[in-house]
Image: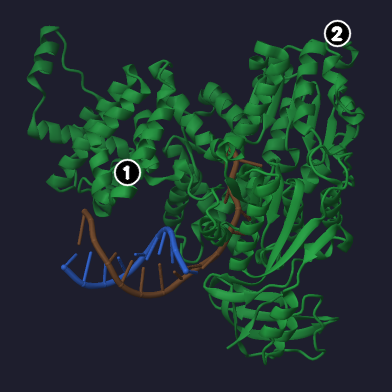
Chain colours: A green, B brown, C blue
Amino acid sequence: MTSSYEPRTGAEHLLADLNPPQREAVATIAGPLLILAGPGSGKTRVITHHIAYLVDAVGVAPWRIVAVTFTNKAAREMRTRVAAHLADAANDVVLGTFHSICARFLRTEAERIGLSRSFNIFDDADQMAVVKRAAEDSNVDLKRYKERMLLGSISHAKSELVSPDEYARNARDYYAEVVARVYARYDELLAANNALDFDDLLLRAVEMLRDNTELREKYQERFLHVVVDEFQDTNIAQYELAKLWAGKHRNIAVVGDPDQSIYSWRSADIRNILNFERDFPDAKVVLLEQNYRSTQNILDAAHAVIAGSRQRKEKSLWTDAGEGEPVVLYEAYDEQEEADFVASEVQALTREELRYSDIAVMYRTNAQSRALEEAFIRARIPYQLIGGTRFYERREVKDILAYMRLVQNPYDQVAFGRIVNVPGRGVGAKTLSELERWAGQLDVPVWNALQIIAEQEKARTAPVPDNVRLFEEAAGRRPPASLPAQLAQRAGKHPLGSRQARALAEFSRMVDELVELSSKNTLSTLLDAILERTAYRRYLFDEFDEPEAEERWANVGELRNVAAEYDGLDPSRALVAFLEDVALISDADTISEEAAGEASGRVTLITLHSAKGLEYPAVFMTAMEEGVLPHIRSFDDPASLEEERRLCYVGMTRAKRRLYLVRAFRRHTMGMSQHNPPSRFLRDIPPELLAQRQHVADEYEAVERGPSRMRESFARDDRPTMPDTALFTGGERVRHPHFGEGIVVSCQVIGDDQEVTVAFKGAFGMKKLMLSFAPLERL
DNA sequence: ATACACGCGCTTTTT
DNA sequence: GCGCGTGTAT
């Protein structure tokens, strides 16, 4: 039993500088363990010490520990910090993201599930292309069912380990039936592409361990300890995986904070952490409540917000850092003035105590960054925008990657479709669909059809090069009839025009040559060959104007730098490794490292979601308004509202010393100007914690107060007193800034509030809106 | 096959 | 208010 281990001498330092609960968490070495770690409570420290303690003090072999995180960045940091204690032994700990660990596992065991080792990993854009095709194949109207939504449903199903069959069996409504059909076809297409999507990495790993006793027992025997970070963000598949890993020894330590669960829309299931004790009744629970990040005022304000949440495990953060400054509440006129306030306050802060890199401005939606950027440019404040178009999502980067993907796996139709006509080769949609139809007729993958065409073209234009024929005959052999050559004879003439056929044959030959070249050359050589063979630079400068083309070319150069890092590897492994890393490493990793790094000397502009896990001496949270935070899309769902609350909590707890909560009286969104009441979360913060700077709000009201009774009631900052007769009657035409035009169905008084039901044009359907928050405009 | 115009529909995005 | 995808004109 693991519990019989005695700490070795010399490892005491791993416990020495920890507070009592931290120490308990680190030194609990047997059985299930739930560590509820508040923000800034030294969570990573506890995990790394725990791992080091297992190895150093308990004598566990490092390769028998699996520690899993959500981001590569977190994994890297953890590896580094474990290495600080264990030196080289740290490299033997199985440490990585769920996805990377699974990818590696599947790569090794791929043959068991009839998968080629060279499978490609499809990212979001690839998945969209596949789901689109799947919907078309299933006769699903993409106008009516958006592929984004279909993919979301499929992804969610996979995250909950629901197979296409099971999904079809449980389909209770028409939409579910549609999804079931698309889901089934989608999986077929992935298989045909020799590809897995992100969800598959988890799903297939679970399936493989579940279905294969021998394999399961092998890994269960091996994994003496399982550690899961950010447990509140795990989905069903991930939790299942962790349980499978820990199935024999039951040493499973999970670390997380339900209050910081903000990714339910990505299938994270907060119940995993809330119900852990039900799944493991003998679990030891440790609360980390001492905070080493923020002042007490900030903690109290944040606690006041999160206390309004239902789905939580009570914990209350404290610090011995002292009260600190009050939280500042500022009410601006509009988003411009809001941004100007932030800019001028940033100037003031940096004059006294802080550097630009100490400051972050946070917002709910990316679109909000615009006004802030403009203000920062006006004020000449250097800033760094996190998010936006990511490096690996840039067109030029995706193009080159598609070439590399095709070299690794020519059956990858998504990659093929992306670059077969980039740069332009005169192969359009018509030609492609003809090609696909013909491939279907022959019942071969598109790639093979292409090879057949290449063979036929070769035979027509240059029938078997003499040198090859003579060489083979001299050696006493018949020239080998390759599969495409044989097929080419049987297939019959392809249906394409000669120009198209020649272009495709040329393309196919190029890929063949690149495949050949890649087998004995470095990655950067391969990449150079691709650039050269496609004249990609010229293509960029033809396609785009000077500065943009330069920038895109620079991105290609950057990609080459990344590829060159794999040059030391054996050519047979370099491409696989590179593509896998690229697929699994979001550049949020690299970018936020730069941005959070003090060297940047810039203010950080960042969404609340991306800010999780980061900390800054000064934090501005903007648009603290109903409709933005909480976001309007969460209004009709209590669970989503809870998540918005947690998001607010996450934002507030990023602040170390200074926290600003800013709202605007009026805000321009999507071309419309609207008034948003202050966020309900502001109301939860006790006034004594706040330094209010709202001298302006009342004046705005007076100015804005118009003839409409609606506007009058919206303009009130406190809970609006609604007239006790309904403000709208059925049949009135109204406009909502987000949902657009609609017709009032009904309006009823509910206590101090009114609920209006509106049928909106288009896909949104009927909506019930609380009138106190709904910015409806009569038409 | 490509070039532009029009209209539609809009959170968040660890892998 | 803007980007993207579809549709039509060259």
Please name the residue shown 48% across and 49% down the image.
A389
On the image, the x and y values in percent for residue A725 come to 79, 91
Front position in the image: A235 or A749: A749
The answer to whether residue A380 is left or right of residue A223 is left
Circle 2: is it few (<14), some (14-19), or many (20+) Cα within 10 Å? Answer: few
Please name the residue shown 28% across and 43% down the image.
A420
**Disc number lying in front (2 or 1):** 1
Q: CA distance from mark 2 to mark 1?
A: 59 Å
On the image, the x and y values in percent for residue A699 come to 72, 80
Q: Is residue A179 above or below residue A228?
A: below
Q: Quadrant of residue A445?
A: top left
State whether residue A169 appears in this view: yes
Question: Which residue is identified by label 2?
Answer: A8
Circle 1: is it few (<14), some (14-19), or many (20+) Cα within 10 Å? Answer: some
What secondary structure is found at the residue carrying circle 1? helix
Question: Which residue is identified by label 1?
Answer: A550
Q: Quadrant of residue A686?
A: bottom right
